[in-house]
Amino acid sequence: MSEALDSMDFRPLGELLCPEPEERPDLWPWSARRREDGVLEIGGVALSEVAQEFATPLFVLDRADLRGRANIWATAMAEEFWDGYGMNGGDAFYAGKAFLCSDVVRTVSEVGMGIDTASLGELTMAVRSGVEPSRIGLHGNNKLDSEIELALRAGGGKGIERIFVDSLPEVAQIEAIAARLNTSARVMIRVKTGVHAGGNEYISTGHEDQKFGVGAFDGQLEEVVAAIEAAPHLEFRGLHSHIGSQIQGTAAFEEAASIICSLGKKISEMIGRPVEEIDLGGGVGVAYTGDDEPPTPPVEVVRQIARSVREACTRLDMKIPRVSVEPGRSIAGPSTVTLYRVGAVKDANLAEGFTRRYVAVDGGMADNIRPALYGARYTATLANRVSDAELVRSRVVGKHCESGDIVVWDVDLPSDVRAGDLLAVPVTGAYGYSMASNYNMLTKPGVIAVEDGAAEWIMRPQTVEDLLALDPGLD
Ligand code: LLP
């Protein structure tokens, strides 16, 4: 009883309302609006209609929004690092782990972004979607031979431009594969800058005691550079740092940029030529609920990174390298909402006068593991109508067989929310579908893109037959 009360948000009713699109545009796709009849609309399409046509649960991606956010990053990098400003060029690579399918690849490529991948699946998706190999990167702390081989064979043997070396043994691994394929591999080194940033321990990656990258201050980096320089089939291109994810503000990025420049200077002295490129990874945060501050605009992050790089290079008296970034969440996250159909609604009486309403929907932790995994907070609103019924503090839960199956921890919903209503959960475009599972043998929802009044599948929903097809014991 008291534990349940401990986890209850006692703020006055009304404080945990989901902000409407016009109140907090940063929580919604750009085209989201509430129609006069109370129905939420995205991309010119009524969510009540797409729920009918495509069924729920459903990811609804506003393609123009995604394109716009990608364009902001690509343009900011091109402009702030324009060589007319004495810079040496800048690039933005979309981090495919946030959400990847061919439509997304094409949408972000259209505005000049490259694609950053971290597995055979992501790399194959990028290659098969037609991305120029020179616009693809490959990450991973434990790369498979098959991943490296595809990276080197892509584009009829041209190979991708950036393989991020994550450890000393990987140098020999890539060298052996490049030698066997009689080609050369262009590599960068992922380093631990010591900058500790990010939404939580699981997604913070710059510090020493975690699995990614090589030590920058303990001789490891020099050892890896020397190994690459000695490898006949490897070309050393530069240094990479990713300090974490869901980062607010610009200070941590500025610090990482400055440290990477100093390391670049040290390495250029070691190899006797300038380090061509530095990559500062992803990590720019987004707001998920009305409690979160609106995020720092990407343009501002890029501007501060550019300032920091310029200052560091001037101080170090070194040539400014080409600079790249790999944003994922800040592009895909707010572009998408998840649409659920409400089913069972019930009240749990926690103590005299304290009731928590449980509103169950037709998806849950299999399509969004983040609340269960990280305690991540989301919000939700009625999508098929508005209601002036009194509010009740509600917890939106899924249909999986465990009590941690929470979609929204606490939100104030009208007390007349009932079976058949639709709930929209905003900011689910990053690390929702891409971390989805088939727990309880639920099928993964599909993803539709909406744009200019039209809706179409960009990932079709799984069927039970898709799941059963993997089982050789069934006819
Ligand atoms: N570059 C590298 C090397 C990365 O490891 C990541 C994210 C990114 C770029 C993109 O970061 P973003 O801009 O999306 O923050 N599953 C967690 C997030 C893990 C992020 C892992 N790496 C979550 O749901 O919060």
Image (cartoon, helix red, strand yellow):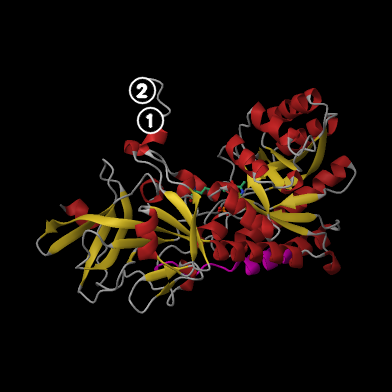
- Residue bearing mark 1: 468
Q: CA distance from mark 2 to mark 1?
A: 7 Å
Tell me what residue is drawn at x 47 percent, y 73 percent.
25
- Determine which of the numbered discs, if any, sits on residue 246 in the image: none
The foreground one among 128 and 300 is 128
Marks 2 & 1, CB-CB < 8 Å contact: yes
Q: In the picture provided, is 113 more to the left or to the right than 408?
A: right
Residue at the far bottom in the pictured view: 36
Q: In the picture provided, is 321 more to the left or to the right than 463?
A: right
Q: Is mark 2 within 8 Å of ligand 1?
A: no
Residue 424, quarter of picture: bottom left
Residue at the far right in the pictured view: 272
Tell me what residue is drawn at x 28 percent, y 43 percent.
400
Query: Dot 1: within a 10 Å radius of its alpha carbon, few (fewer than 14), some, or many (20 or more) residues?
Result: few
User: In the image, which residues are magenta?
Assistant: 290-307
Tell me what residue is drawn at x 21 percent, y 58 percent.
419
Total count of labels: 2
**Label 1: element kind:** helix
Tell me what residue is drawn at x 56 percent, y 48 percent.
100
- Residue bearing mark 2: 474
Q: Amino acid at mark 2?
A: Leu
The foreground one among 427 and 385 is 385
The foreground one among 463 and 251 is 463
Q: Specify whether residue 34 is painted magenta.
A: no
Q: In the picture provided, is 48 more to the left or to the right than 351?
A: right
Q: Amino acid at mark 1?
A: Leu
Give the percent coordinates (x, y) of residue 203.
Answer: 51, 48
